[in-house]
Image (cartoon, rainbow, N blue to C red):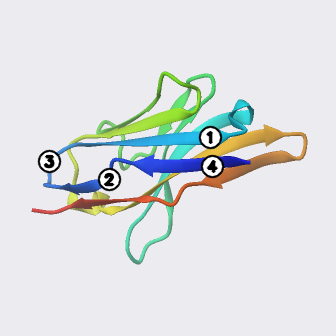
Amino acid sequence: QVQVVESGGGLVQPGGSLRLSCVASGSIYSIVAMSWYRQAPGKERELVAIVTEGGTTYHADSVKGRFTISKGNAKNTVHLQMNSLKPEDRAVYYCTASTQATSGVTDYWGQGTQVTVSS
């Protein structure tokens, strides 16, 4: 089992920046990737960015060049640096930790952190 906790959300003006953090605990030795998803009001949840255990990253086209996912100093931490925020970035942001076992991959989700972009 893995527990995931996000932090760093809040209210920011358009063009501003926020840094989200995520910490996983529990069976962290089995984590192979950590990701950020977001869900805006009335919309489906969408993938924002992924970082693998090996450091490979992926960013959705909608955030490429503005958001950066990175691993923290500890294996079980990940950050999402969000710059040049737009009103359409407003959403609940969720962190996930993906673990690998013989039975397959399991995703563990945090409770989410609210990001609001408004003047």
**Distance in Å between CA atoms under marks 2 and 3:** 15 Å
Q: Where is residue 100 in the image (x, y as percent from the top left)?
A: 78, 39
Secondary structure at badge 1 equals: strand
Q: Mark 4 points at which residue?
A: 3
Query: What residue sits right under mark 1 in the picture?
Result: 25
Q: How crowded is mark 3: few (under 14 residues within 10 Å), some or many (20 or more)?
A: some
In the depicted structure, whether residue 114 falls above or below residue 106: below
Q: Distance between the residues labelled 3 and 4?
A: 32 Å
What kind of residue is marked 2? Gly
Closer to the camera: disc 3 or disc 1? Answer: 1
First in sequence, mark 3 or 1: give its number: 3
Q: Nearer the viewer, mark 2 or mark 4?
A: 4
Residues 8 and 84: in front is 8
Residue 51 image offset from top left, x and y in percent: 54, 33
Disc 3, SS: loop
Residue that sits furthest to the front in the current view: 26
